[in-house]
Amino acid sequence: MHSHFRSRTDNVEGMTSLQVTDDAIQQTRELRDEFQRFLREYEFGMREVETKIGILRDEFTHHHAYNPIEHVKSRLKTPDSIVEKIARKGIAEPDFARIRSEITDIAGVRVTCSFVADVYRLFDLLTAQDDVTVVTVKDYIANPKDNGYKSLHAIIEVPVFLSTGALSVPVEVQFRTIAMDFWASLEHKIYYKFSNQVPSHLVESLTDAAEAAAELDSRMERLHREAHGVPQRQLAPPPPPHVVQVLSLIHI
């Protein structure tokens, strides 16, 4: 087997340098291009989900009296982050096919809602669409993590239509309330500051804060229901105007 790298010793202080062959340069470029295509597929899938959420958000804003979506964020894992996750998962001799099957959160969208009921409603509206396939669901709202973390996680697959044909792309979608998002952001900053070695008293305080955030969610949702006269976990918007008109005609 011929090596693509040739070593030679310079006459300057005995230093050794590497000469890279044209084949090695070409292979490196091809690998770079393939990796860029790989990431772009996930970017396209992420944008598809963003569009779906954006359409729902615009519909609620313009056609209903209540919009359950507070804000939406998205992110694509960096190459370094993907490499780190490959190492953590112990994937030996990874290729793009194995990365696709083993790492399903390369593309992520986070939907922050007003109340817990909105979280489940948005999840239902998104996953009920014909071209959305639900792969896995982890309900950390019903079953919080030990540290108090709450969120609804779903891995879904959406089709992306390329010039080469349709491609099914996995995207992780997280649904959470404002209080859950605030707590998770604070927890992340604390763990980052202490390099994941958080003092026990801060861990206990974070757990207490998670319980307080859950209580706040519950109280605010009760207030919302009392103010708007809607039953728990049924925050459906009023019917569109044309439906109201038809109902009025029927009563007449």
Image (cartoon, rainbow, N blue to C red):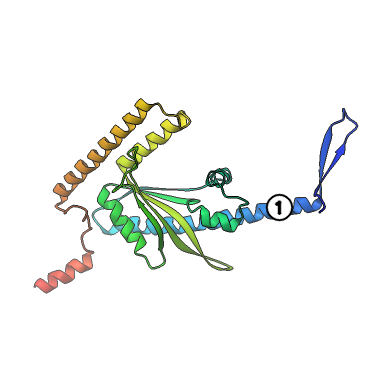
* Residue at horizontal 43 percent and vertical 32 percent from the top: 191
Residue furthest left in the image: 252
The image position of residue 146, as x and y in percent, is: 34, 39
Disc count in the image?
1
Residue on which the image places disc 1? 29
Q: As drawn, is 56 to the left or to the right of 233?
A: right
* Residue at horizontal 27 percent and vertical 59 percent from the top: 63
Secondary structure at numbered mark 1: helix
Q: Is residue 109 above or below residue 8?
A: below
Q: Is residue 242 above or below residue 229?
A: below
The image position of residue 89, as x and y in percent, is: 53, 47
The amino acid sitting under disc 1 is Arg
* Residue at horizontal 36 percent and vertical 52 percent from the top: 138
Q: Nearer the viewer, residue 161 or 107?
A: 107
Q: As drawn, is 109 to the left or to the right of 176?
A: right
Residue 39 visible, this orientation: yes
Q: Nearer the viewer, residue 157 or 109?
A: 157
Quadrant of res 181: top left
Q: As drawn, is 97 to the left or to the right of 129?
A: right
Residue furthest right in the image: 11
Q: Mark 1 Cα within 10 Å, few/some/many (few <14, many 20+)? A: few
Quadrant, the C terminus: bottom left
Quadrant of res 156: bottom left
The image position of residue 197, as x and y in percent, is: 45, 29
* Residue at horizontal 25 percent and vertical 57 percent from the top: 64
Quadrant, the N terminus: bottom right
Q: Is residue 245 above or below residue 106?
A: below
Residue 67 visible, this orientation: no
Q: As drawn, is 102 to the left or to the right of 134?
A: right
The image position of residue 173, as x and y in percent, is: 40, 52
